[in-house]
Amino acid sequence: MPEESNVSRRSFLKQSAAGAAAGGFVIIKPELVRGAGKELLKAGLVGCGGRGTGAVANMLSGDPNVELVAVGDVFQDKLDASLKNLNDQKFLSRMAKDVPEFTKTPLEQLVASMQKRVKVDPERRFVGFDAYKKVINAGVDVVLLCTPPGHRPLHFEAAINAGRHVFAEKPIATDPVGVRRFIASCRQAQQKRLTVMTGSQSRSSRNYLETIKKLQGGAIGDIIALYSEYLSGPVMHAKARDPQWSDMEWQHRNWYSFVWICGDQIVEQHFHNLDRMYMLMGTHPAKAVASGGIAWRPREELYGNIYDHMGTKFTYANGVVYSSDCRQYQGSVYRKVDDLAVGAKGRSTLNDMGEAGLNGQVQEHIDCLKSIRGDGPYVNQGIPVAETTMTAVMARESAYSGQEVTWDQIMASQLDLYPKEFDYKAKLPEPKLAVPGVYKLV
């Protein structure tokens, strides 16, 4: 094959832009040219914790033509552990165990391919609060944003400004200011035809997609009521604070205990149920009334300022009421995660009328990379997922304040939890547990 015919479509676009600037030809529909078939793509990871490492494994298992070339985290030990796992056959086998059923690739062969495509040279391993900038500018095509969600709006904005495609883990923010910042960047991504895929795996799960399509087609008649439960155990918290850790380092290492960086359970975890209801209803609720508190979490530094249970009544503009409950209790307690839609002619769990497909956490990366290359539909999930995040924030703020909170109120809120400076020795205000009737939504 002649050397010139091997030029990637991305390179072709760059040359075309230069030619246009010099008075040459112009591509009539640049939005149709997003990639080049099976072209090898380069990915960078920001946030090397468990979900970030898992997201990379999901991506590598789902597409043979992508490689990881850059990683970044605020902690060296997290970065090192991530790369160690991504070279571990047992870890990769566990992450990819269901993929062979759909790809017909033997597991051992798939794992060997995944290992070979982790190509992170020492000079592309970045540590620090500015590591995200360095990953974005490390010659990557797509950036995986997998830090705790408090950082997502800033990192997403930087990636879109740099012209990178993005896989962003859910949720996409922890406060209204952050959600609006994310939405603004989503609109820029749409204008640039940049792919934005999110970690809302239900949006890539065949059983949910097929069922919801049938429900929207009237399979159970008009929707009358909606219910969700996310009854689980605690996600994580550190065992103790090292006396040498500053507030900033401590809160990052124990991130699930602090509202500014995790958002509380309803934002960080119950998000999935809320997003499936968004998929079904095609919109967000109009208002929320919620209650919550702490049943077991001691008021100690280790446990931060999140609640351990919350119940919410959402009301949609058409009058449909959605009742949701979430809690994270320790020990041997009842646990269940489910959804229920009640219609005039029946009921559904939202996933009971569709066929099983590939794990959604793998399928979302397949869809993302196909969108980037242009051999699949263009994907930008940013705004609906941002609205689901805001739905969760609306409920949290209702529980914290003890007030009904409307969509218009939360969209106008000036609540901004994000620290203004980041340093390993930085001090942060003592996190206060919200007390209904005292706490105010701003």
Image (cartoon, rainbow, N blue to C red):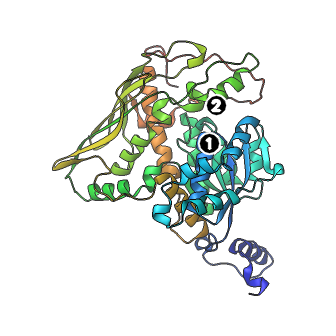
Task: Check disc 1 and give the amino acid type.
Answer: Pro
Q: Which residue is most to the bottom?
A: 2
In-front residue for pair 193/129: 129
- Residue 418: which disc? 2
Secondary structure category for the residue under label 1: helix
> Is any atom of residue 251 visible in this view?
yes
Query: Quarter holding the N terminus?
Result: bottom right
Secondary structure category for the residue under label 2: loop
11 above or below 311? below
For marks 2 and 1, the one nearer the N-term is 1
x then y, percent, for residue 377: 50, 67
The quarter of the displayed image where residue 37 is located: bottom right
x then y, percent, for residue 425: 78, 23
Residue shown at the point (68%, 50%) measured from the top left? 87
Residue shown at the point (40%, 21%) measured from the top left? 292
Residue shown at the point (49%, 16%) measured from the top left? 297
The span from disc 2 to disc 1 (Cα, nearest Å) is 10 Å
Task: Check disc 2 and give the amino acid type.
Answer: Tyr
Residue shown at the point (64%, 74%) measured from the top left? 36
- Residue 166: which disc? none
x then y, percent, for residue 418: 64, 31
For label 1, the residue is: 153
Mark 2 and mark 1 in contact? Answer it, CB < 8 Å.
Answer: yes
x then y, percent, for residue 83: 71, 46
- Mark 2 crowdedness (10 Å alpha carbons): few <14, some 14-19, many ≥20: some
